[in-house]
Image: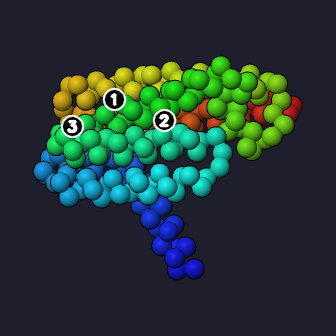
Amino acid sequence: MRGARSLKGIQLVAVLALLAWPFLVWFGLTRNSLHWLLPIIALLLAFRLYQVKSQRGPMRYVLQAVALAGLTLCLMSYVLKTHQLLLFYPVVVNLVMLGVFGSSLWSSMPMVERLARLQEPELPLSGVRYTRKVTQIWCVFFILNGSMALFTVLLGDIRLWTLWNGMIAYLLMGALMAGEWLVRRRRILRDAA
């Protein structure tokens, strides 16, 4: 029982570390602390990669790819002794997400439909069309967000990079999720009437 709680605590820390990536990198770069922080981040990412292997569902491979990308950037930064590589993590995450969501548009079931079918296995045809549009919207989001993340890296302003990747991007993502949820609720109520 105690081991299970410890494992869940480590899982939570790993997820929080990924969400806090911009702040950890900012702290490490501005305080010249990445020499000790980098191995901790890499260890948490390795644990996350291991932990995600046991998950099921359509997001499993996405989460693995994101953790592997972060781990690779950590290792490259350590070996090459250039910690600025860590700044590319949000760019890589957006590329991975765009690749997964975008490639799913050419399959029989786009990513958002796969996620929707976890809650509603018998999705009506109108829901299938809707989830395809939502998948396209997410692709546009990943292109725009990834482009802005790359711009902040190339600009070289660590404060702007941290502000965009640590706050603004999360707020925009949350707004898109909330907006999509509200539209979906409205469509369900309209279809039920």
Residue sitting at 50 percent across and 45 percent down? 64
Picture coordinates of residue 151, whole percent (x, y): 28, 24
Residue that badge 2 annotates: 173
Task: Give SS at disc 3.
Answer: helix
Looking at the rendered image, the disc whose residue lies closer to the viewer, 1 or 2, is 1
Picture coordinates of residue 162, whole percent (x, y): 27, 39
Residue that badge 1 annotates: 149
Residue sitting at 48 percent across and 61 percent down? 11
Task: Give SS at disc 2.
Answer: helix
Among the two numbered marks 2 and 3 on one chain, the one whose residue lies closer to the N terminus: 3
For the residues labelled 2 and 3, the Cα–Cα distance comes to: 25 Å
Above or below: residue 130 compared with residue 57: above
Asked if the residues shown at circle 3 and circle 1 are in contact, with their CB atoms under 8 angstroms apart, the answer is: no
Asked if the residues shown at circle 2 and circle 3 are in contact, with their CB atoms under 8 angstroms apart, the answer is: no
Residue sitting at 84 percent across and 37 percent down? 122
The quarter of the picture where residue 189 lies is top right
Picture coordinates of residue 159, whole percent (x, y): 21, 38
Looking at the rendered image, the disc whose residue lies closer to the viewer, 2 or 3, is 3
